[in-house]
Image (cartoon, helix red, strand yellow):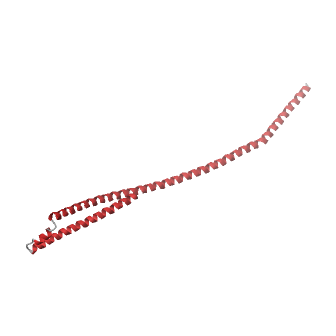
Amino acid sequence: MSDMRSGLMSCRRRLSLRRAVVGLLAIALIAVFAPAAGADTTSQIAVQEKRLKWLEGVARQKQARVASIQASMRSLTAQIRESNAELDRLDRRWKRHQDQLIDTMAAYDRLRGQMDTASIEMYMRGPTHYVGAVMGAETLSDVGDAVNYTGALLSRNRRLAEQTALATHEITALREQDEAMIAQ
């Protein structure tokens, strides 16, 4: 029995020794490979941190671009508002201009009508009517009245001619302004 006991003890010691060696070997392996695994994780973290910094830089660039586009849009919106206001002013100016042209043309038509009437009256009376009125006067007062009447008619006709010429000039000027406004 004692041999058996001693054999059993020896077996236990060997087993314990083996366990101790295997345990030490496992600890040694872990000690050798654990830093390598940690180094791999550390390098992966470093790569991901670089990628994160790059992505943050890209995000900042995109945000700056968006801010630039928004500023451009605000500027363009202000320019559009100014252009619309200018267009409204031009529309109002055009309407006033067209109203003025219509009024001037109506005045011109009235003046032409009055001139036509005066021409018809002169034609109907004939070229000697005024001379005959002066020659047929019985008193000096009748001669004065005939001369005054003839002078008044001539003054009226001259005013009508001047007003017609002025209206013609104004219509021409307004039409030139039309062309200039359209060219804008």
Relative side of 69 to 134, left or right: right
Q: Name the residue at the right extreme.
A: 3
Residue at 17% in and 64% down: 123
Residue at 87% in and 32% down: 14
Examine the image and state in which quarter residue 87 appears.
Answer: bottom left
The image position of residue 99, as x and y in percent, is 30, 58
The image position of residue 83, as x and y in percent, is 42, 56
Question: Is residue 105 depicted above or below 43 in this figure?
Answer: below
Question: 40 or 16, which is in the foreground?
Answer: 40
Relative side of 138 to 156, left or right: left
The image position of residue 31, as x and y in percent, is 78, 42
Relative side of 41 to 142, left or right: right
Question: 100 or 45, which is in the foreground?
Answer: 100
The image position of residue 91, as x and y in percent, is 36, 56
Question: Is residue 167 depicted above or below 20 in this figure?
Answer: below
Residue at 68% in and 46% down: 47
Residue at 20% in and 69% down: 155
Examine the image and state in which quarter residue 107 appears.
Answer: bottom left
Question: 85 or 129, which is in the foreground?
Answer: 129
